[in-house]
Image (tube, rainbow, N blue to C red):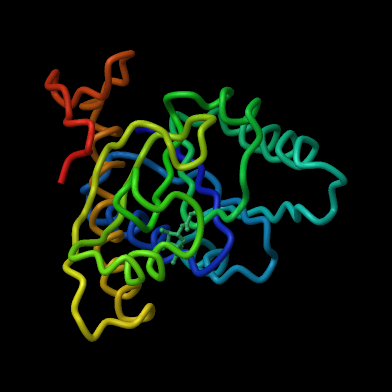
Amino acid sequence: LKRIVVLISGSGSNLQAIMDAIQSGQINGQIELVISNKADAYGLIRAKNAGIATCVIDHKAFDSRESFDLAVQQRIDTIEPDLVILAGFMRILSAGFVRHYSGRMLNIHPSLLPKYKGLHTHQRALAAADKEHGCTVHFVTEELDGGPLLVQAVVPVKTDDTEATLQARVHEREHIAYPLAVEWICADRIRVCEDGIYRDNELLPTSGFR
Ligand code: GAR
């Protein structure tokens, strides 16, 4: 059983989707710990309801990004996880932290990467009059939202969409895409190599798997 640590900052609906997929047997893994940088993150309640250990490490209590990251790293490493999952964890991570979990840390980002790295992705897709938008699960590297892509889910952009309606449509698909990526990793179907990501010994397209 793969040992998983999840980092959150907010609602934790992606955490919920992953917990549900473990419960249903889709994912062969176990969440050992949920860490939040915010004490009032609703995801902490979701974790507690599922009997999962939680921990709050408030970034405001640290005087540098590096010292916060080191505290998080030390807490994570007590678990010796196979996989670290960023699920709406809204902190930029320092290079040393990212390197420490190289090849075993995932993030979900609400755009079709490499489009719209960073914030306000739905607003930017609307402003560009994109026909398609979506989300991406990727391995985390030192480049912000720049690591190798594992899964993408695409949704249409409708002419009457607002930021809220588009975000809701993407969010729904995140809850399918993230468990799928975690399922593959926990089933040892994914290999990260220099030339890209292999699933069942087949190189995934660089635009990600849709
Ligand atoms: C998700 O939409 C995720 O894609 C986004 O935060 C939301 C968290 O929702 N992540 C980022 O923007 C990362 N830069 P959740 O707390 O309900 O899972």
Residue 14, compared with residue 160, is above or below; it is above
The answer to which image quadrant residue 137 occupies is top left
Residue 96, compared with residue 149, is above or below; it is above
For the point 57% across and 30% down, which residue is it? 98
For the point 23% across and 31% down, which residue is it? 206
For the point 82% across and 42% down, which residue is it? 64
Ligand 1 lies in which image quarter? bottom left
Toward the viewer: 49 or 10?
A: 10
The answer to which image quadrant residue 100 occupies is top right
Toward the viewer: 72 or 50?
A: 72
Residue 155, compared with residue 67, is above or below; it is below
The answer to whether 59 appears left or right of 82 in the picture is: right
Residue 127 spot, x, y in % from top left:
36, 70
Identify the residue at the far bottom of this view.
160
The answer to whether 187 appears left or right of 120 in the picture is: left
Residue 103 spot, x, y in % from top left:
42, 24
Residue 121 spot, x, y in % from top left:
41, 62
Q: Quadrant of the N terminus?
A: top left
Residue 196 spot, x, y in % from top left:
27, 21
